[in-house]
Image (cartoon, helix red, strand yellow):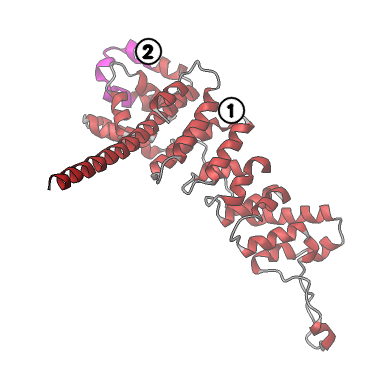
Amino acid sequence: MSSSDFRQIAIRTEAGKAERLFRASVSAFCSLTRPSRREIGQLEDLTLPLFEEVSVESRRYVAAALSECEYAPGALVRRLAEEPVDIAAPLLTRSRALSDIDLIALIGRHGLPHARAIARRKELNPTIADLIKALEKPTLVRVRPPQPIAQPVSAKAEAAPAKAEATPAAESLAIASDEDAQQPPGMAAENARRRLRAMMRPETGSESVNPFVGRASFVKLRETALTGNAAFFQTALADALDIDFQTARSLTEQASYAALLAALRSLDLSEDRAFLIAVAVYPREFPHPQAIRLFLDRYRLLHREAALDKVRNWKAETLSRGIRGNAADRANDEERRASNSGDAAASLKAS
């Protein structure tokens, strides 16, 4: 993936921009041998906001690509795993980014279609395998009725094998198995799914949609801006937006505060907080009250989604530079090896 490809993707007027950016960013990420945590986070910040805008084919393509990726981003994989099984199947059967807890939660929410795909995983946890069997045939998971202490156990009863033994983790499915046996198979499977959902409810709390919002980010931006040291503020801005230092520096070295305005708006800062940071970074832009009013008007009129779109473009450029750097390093290594081998051959011939 070259930088020109990313620039073409980032053109606002181009049709299908979200579709191409979604596919291209994942393809570029999968080409990285060992991505860093920052690169993983950048991919999630790029793709998750675009998820609802892309087609089923793109989701299927990305799911297949990430299923073979050793360091796939967990949030994106989990989001794809919630899709219908014809999209999520590669991830359900192969992805290492899905933990056992994730798999149980998916079974609880989606039932047999997802469970059957998960059952094809290599080295599947035996407890999860038992849960899937319970969904397939709920009547096979039974709890042996307690025997009275004084009642003797016949030899025939001791010799009769149990149909199946419930594992400790599957006990919640087995509690009402005798009742399930009296119900139609569809009703029994639904009861099993309901118990799975109850098991997983504490683990599936709601997550914050916006990863940027937080008082800590504002305080760090404010304190570094008030130091008067541009490098300190640029570092804090890079951390807040999850972009590289070079991009953050370019945002604050422009003649106007337009780029900084979009950056602050993407962080969802209030007007007074955004103005405090802007006036600390661009003090000459606010010589009179009218300039302040103009800033506040622009800040109010700038839609946050448009600001986030700009941040995603900056992240795409950051990712593109990282890929170009890796490619250049590999080319330089190959050139050095070729040069060294040529010098060695020449010296050997001369000797």
- Closer to the camera, 122 or 200? 122
Q: Secondary structure at mark 1?
A: helix
Considering every residue shown, the one lying at the far left of the view is 351
The residue at 84%/63% (across/down) is 181
Say which quarter of the image contains residue 145: bottom right
Q: Amino acid at mark 2?
A: Leu
Q: Amino acid at mark 1?
A: Glu
Question: Which contiguous range is marked in magenta?
Answer: 276-295
How crowded pointer 1 is (Cα within 10 Å; few <14, some 14-19, many 20+) is rated as few
Q: Which residue is mark 2?
A: 294
- Closer to the camera, 191 or 139? 139
Name the dominant secondary structure of the magenta segment. Answer: helix
**Between tags 2 and 1, which lies in front?**
1
Residue 187 lies left or right of residue 11; in this view the side is: right
Q: Which residue is mark 1?
A: 53
Residue 280 counted in the magenta span: yes
Query: Compared with residue 183, is residue 21 higher up or lower down, i.e. above or below?
Result: above
Could you say where residue 188 lies in the image, as x and y percent from the top left?
80, 56
Quarter containing the N terminus: top left
Q: Secondary structure at mark 2?
A: helix
Whether residue 270 is visible to the viewer of this picture, yes or no, is no
Could you say where residue 75 lies in the image, as x and y percent from the top left?
52, 43
Query: Compared with residue 288, is residue 163 higher up or lower down, i.e. above or below?
Result: below
